Amino acid sequence: MAQKEVNTKTKVQKPELEPLSDNGISVHTKTLQRWYQLLHLGRLLDQKAATYVRQAKGWSYHSSCAGHEGIQLILGLSFRQGKDFLFPYYRDLMTSLSAGLSVQEIIANGLSKATDVGSGGRHMSNHFSKPSIRIQNVSSATGNHALHAVGVARAIKKYGGDELAFASFGDSAVSEGFVYEAVSGAAREILPVIFVIQNNKFGISVPIDEQAANKVVAENFRGFKSVKIVKVDGTNVFDSWRGMQEALDYVKSGEGPAIVHADCVRINSHSNSDRQELYRSPEEIAEAQRFDPVRRLRSYLLSHDELSEEEITHIESENSRLVEDAATEVEAQPEPDPATAMQYVLPPVYERAQEDAPAQAPADAPTLTLREAINETLKEEFRRNPNTFLWGQDVASHEKGGVFNVTKGMLQEFGNERIFNAPIAEDFIVGTADGFARYRDDICVVIEGAQFVDYFWPAMEQLVEISHEYYRTLGQFTPNVVIRLASGGYIGGGLYHSQSLDATFATIPGLRIVMPSFADDAIGLMRMSMRSKGPTIFIENKFLYNQFFTKTPRPTPDHVVPFGKARVRREGNDLTIIAWGTPVHFALRVAAKLADEHGVQAEVIDLRSINPLDVDAILTSVKKTGRLLVAHEHPLFGGFGGEIASLVAEQAFQYLDAPVMRVASKNSPVPFARVLERAVLVQEEDILQAAVKLAGF
């Protein structure tokens, strides 16, 4: 007879609840009642979210706030609706609830309903926001909103406001470089911002000792001048309140920013896709329950005779009813309409009374180079709108005015409050621009995103963030930012001083990308960029800055070039050459040689705008000439010319008399030695040879 199998596993005993101490802090009973009502309500919502996940009814991303509720409650209550700026992170359900989101609004986000006040179902569940009361819509890139909080805090200080910025994130976010940049910048500029670090000792499955040298991660910032560090027990509402008041008093005094380091526990797995049992022992998981903020406050209220069992049970019953009623209501609400999926990709543009025409100017009007045109237009727009600001590297160093003197004279005319240098931290430059623009809708920020476009790579994460702010918030916010970037080669600059990124930028939806090659277009496109809503990448080919052949007469004061409108630089009937940036000038010379030496009339189109793209101009020209050559400076492989070739092949194939051809730089980094640079970058002769071949096909 088989012996019965005996289970030798012992059941883990749940440790007793850690008593909650008020440390002598006196709080009115009605306030305590409200605190518990919110804490318990948040816990019910957190549990409801987990239920939705198990039922496969929604909330497909859920990151539990259990164990963080003490600090989150106090953070949310410290935020002043419609005044301060709150940047919560994905675990901040309790923060968002106590800051002003209703139960229905929390559930609508979790179920990705069209009624979600933050994004209408466009952003992930558990990413709570309410822009109408200044609870910001932040991304999933952990901690990146620290830079946005610093940016808006800078605007608060510039405008003399009394608002505060709050940035909340977990301990693992402190490993991110942009968090260090944010704290460093806030410390240097003495900004009114409070960083709340909720330390639960885990980054998903990675323990704190594999994340940071200091387990109290706020200690990493101990050397930053003017930063006050306040440590609290994030599971204790009283200690969290004490620490937050200390931080608020300090920041409001104008002495600098503060960090509130909240020691929390993570009661549940990181998220619904994580299983903490795979890396945490049963004893460790059970130990976290001892510091459950909700149970600890409940026990305190009973043991100190603040509320009776009956009163607490009534609160809990009312909360349960509230959650279930709200869930029934929200579940019946509509899903987002698929027909709206492409709305709010690109923000609104500046509207003019009449259509654009080529710049008209008197015959004796002075001419400007590309650099002079950008410089003069920046000054004109800064005079027009006093809520314009410029920062970047070297832009406000006495007489320097940027590496290429494009901003020369602006510091002298507009002062250091509006024109100022940024540290050599590209992520910081772009991220704080995103935040700064949140303060007022009429603010326009112009930044030199990097000294050379090659150095822009550290800011790419912030660029992506900027690109979908408008989309992610359902049109409720877009940062009005013009990102100026000096691009391209032909200057003997080599690696990190000669590359082209226009095709890279074109892969990111939500960005307008322009590249003028003549002075009048630089003026018209800069005006359009600065007067329009949302972000624009303004690419300046540094080889063209001071070239005589970029000169044009100064256009009329109201000259504006629309986005998405190409310009026919030379008309022809035999073949079309499409180019942008420096190759436009090569193409014009090639067209002249084709006419003189081969009797071929080439039409040259200056694209000017990569996104939006003037599809009509491209197709109209190709249908007329039957032949297309695309020329660009970016390497051929992966270059934007491939998109144009594909577009024509799909929509104008029947009009073609020859295959679409492309000529571009080699698939190589741009080297330093002039002879090597010439071998890699596209040259006028390359375009001529390709055009002759295409014409004879």
Image (cartoon, helix red, strand yellow):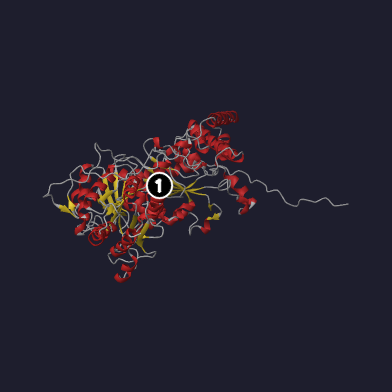
Quarter-of-image position of residue 344: top left
Residue at 56% across, 40% down = 296
| 655 or 156, nearer to the observer | 655
Dot 1 amino acid type: Gln
In the displayed structure image, the side of residue 40 where residue 535 appears, left or right: left
Closest to the observer: 25 or 566?
566
Residue 334, compared with residue 165, is above or below; it is above
Circle 1 SS class: helix
The quadrant of the picture occupied by the C terminus is: bottom left
Front-most of 663 and 55?
Answer: 663
Instruction: Say left or right for 573 vs 48.
Output: left
Spot the residue most to the left. Answer: 364
Q: Is residue 559 visible?
A: yes
On screen, residue 615 versus residue 49, left or right, reads left
Image coords of residue 592 (percent x, y):
23, 58
Is 664 drawn above or below residue 193 in the view shown?
A: below
Left or right of residue 633, residue 35 in this image? right
Q: Position of residue 4 (x, y in %)?
A: 83, 50
Q: Is residue 403 visible?
A: no
> Which residue lies under the disc numbered 1?
651
10 Å neighbourhood of mark 1: few (<14), some, or many (≥20)? few
